[in-house]
Image (cartoon, rainbow, N blue to C red):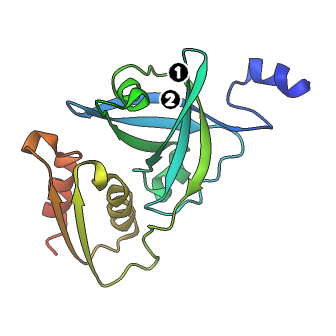
Amino acid sequence: FPADYLKLVIPLWSARELRGKVVDVRQETEDSATLVIKPGWGFSFDYHPGQYIGIGLLMDGRWRWRSYSLTSSPVESHSDHTITITVKAMHEGFLSTHLVGGVAPGTIVRLAPPQGNFVMPDPAPASVLFITGGSGITPVMSMLRTLSRRGQITDIVHLHSTPTESDVMFAAELAKLQSRYPG
């Protein structure tokens, strides 16, 4: 098939499935990392803050799949054509442990389209209360980043819980948002 030969030259192109290339892996905490992924042909950047994607990685001859919340803002994804997911390694999580500690930039992954109904409306409500714990902060980061880029941050309260301060994902960015937007 022509598509089989084309993917040898352009690995992100496929007529049968969405693909992406891991372009960066950034450590967030001791056991979590943000993966910056450049999706290939066919990926729609018209997702909503709070949605998640499926990601498949070839390991030991088998495709392993898991879903992760998008942590990037659709506003920034349109401009640089990348998306981000933030993964917390789970002791029993074979794929999550590999994504946090072993996936290398340049790795080709399979992607499932964005989905999910836990999304931030546009325009945002006048007041918002977020209550998150641990890695549950990931969809909320997409929402906060989007609200900031749209200039829609108004009265927001975010309560977040983790076992220790060093376990807080995005701690520096959250502190910047708090100082930039007193409300």
What kind of element bears circle 1? loop
Residue at point 39% right, 32% down? 96
- At label 1, counting other C-alpha atoms closer than 10 Å, the crowd grade (few under 14, some 14-19, many 20 or more) is few
Q: Position of residue 180 (x, y in %)?
A: 18, 63
From the viewer's perspective, tell me whether residue 151 is left or right of residue 110. left
* Label 2 or label 1, whichever comes before in sequence order: 2
Q: Furthest residue to the top?
A: 60
- Residues 136 and 150: in front is 136
What's under tag 1, amino acid-wise?
A: Gly
Q: Furthest residue to the left?
A: 164
Asked if residue 154 is positioned above or below residue 37 in the image, the reply reads below
Which of the 4 image quarters holds residue 8? Answer: top right
What's under tag 2, amino acid-wise?
A: Val
Which of the 4 image quarters holds residue 49? Answer: bottom left
**Marks 2 and 1, how far apart at CA:** 5 Å
Q: Which residue is mark 1?
A: 106
Q: Position of residue 158 (x, y in %)?
A: 19, 67
Q: Which residue is mark 2?
A: 22
Residue at point 44% right, 36% down? 36
Q: Furthest residue to the front?
A: 92
- At label 2, counting other C-alpha atoms closer than 10 Å, the crowd grade (few under 14, some 14-19, many 20 or more) is many
Location of the N terminus by quadrant is top right
Q: How many marks?
A: 2
- Residues 15 and 135: in front is 135
Residue at point 52% right, 21% down? 106
Q: Furthest residue to the bottom?
A: 126
Location of the C terminus by quadrant is bottom left
From the viewer's perspective, tell me whether residue 131 is left or right of residue 115. left
Asked if residue 74 is positioned above or below residue 33 in the image, the reply reads below
Q: Are marks 2 and 1 in contact (CB under 8 Å)?
A: yes
From the viewer's perspective, tell me whether residue 76 is left or right of residue 15. left
What kind of element bears circle 2? strand
